[in-house]
Image: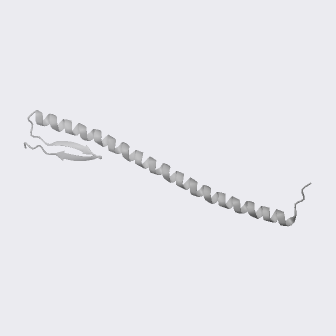
């Protein structure tokens, strides 16, 4: 049988507790880093989506302005950009 002395038990308990604290700190840092990276990726993906949808709106506005000018009209055209109305003045008006 393997005998366990008081000193061995005390030292083993101290080493296990210290190891658990070190592992907890490393895991907390690692999880924090992973969460920060995931959050950054999510924010950048959302930004890319918003910019992409605005690109489509600007292209549609350019088409409307071109059609207005091709028809010979001199009226201003109103477009939206990030939810705000933007007036595009006709160069003929």
Residue 75 in percent (x, y) is at 11, 40
Name the residue: 49% across, 49% down. Answer: 38
Q: From the viewer's perspective, is residue 9 above or below residue 76?
A: below
State the residue in front, 28 or 68.
Answer: 28
Quarter of the rendering occupied by the N terminus = bottom right
Would residue 35 appear left or right of 84 to someone viewing this image?
right
- What residue do we see at 83% from left, 62% from top? 9
Q: Residue at x 26, y 46 (%)?
A: 81
Q: Which sits in the foreground, 68 or 18? A: 18
Q: Nearer the viewer, residue 17 or 67?
A: 17
Q: Residue furthest bottom?
A: 7
Residue 30 is left or right of residue 11, and the answer is left
Q: Which quadrant: the C terminus?
A: top left
- Asked if residue 20 lies left or right of residue 6, the reply is left
> Residue sitting at 32 percent across and 40 percent down?
53
User: Farthest residue toward the front?
Assistant: 2
Q: Is residue 56 above or below residue 15?
A: above
Residue 25 in the image: x percent, y percent?
62, 60
Instruction: Identify the image quadrant of residue 12.
Output: bottom right
Q: Is residue 26 above or below residue 43?
A: below
Snapshot quadrant of residue 88: top left
Q: Position of residue 45 (x, y in %)?
A: 41, 45
């Amino acid at each position: 049988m393997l005998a366990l002395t008081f000193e061995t038990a005390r030292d083993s308990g101290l080493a296990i507790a210290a190891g658990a604290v070190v592992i907890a700190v490393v895991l907390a840092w690692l999880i924090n880093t992973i969460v920060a990276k995931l959050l950054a990726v999510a924010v950048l993906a959302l930004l890319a989506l918003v910019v992409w949808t605005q690109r489509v709106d600007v292209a549609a506005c350019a088409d409307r302005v071109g059609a207005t000018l091709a028809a010979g009209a001199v009226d201003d055209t109103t477009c939206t950009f990030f939810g705000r109305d933007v007036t595009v003045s006709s160069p003929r008006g």
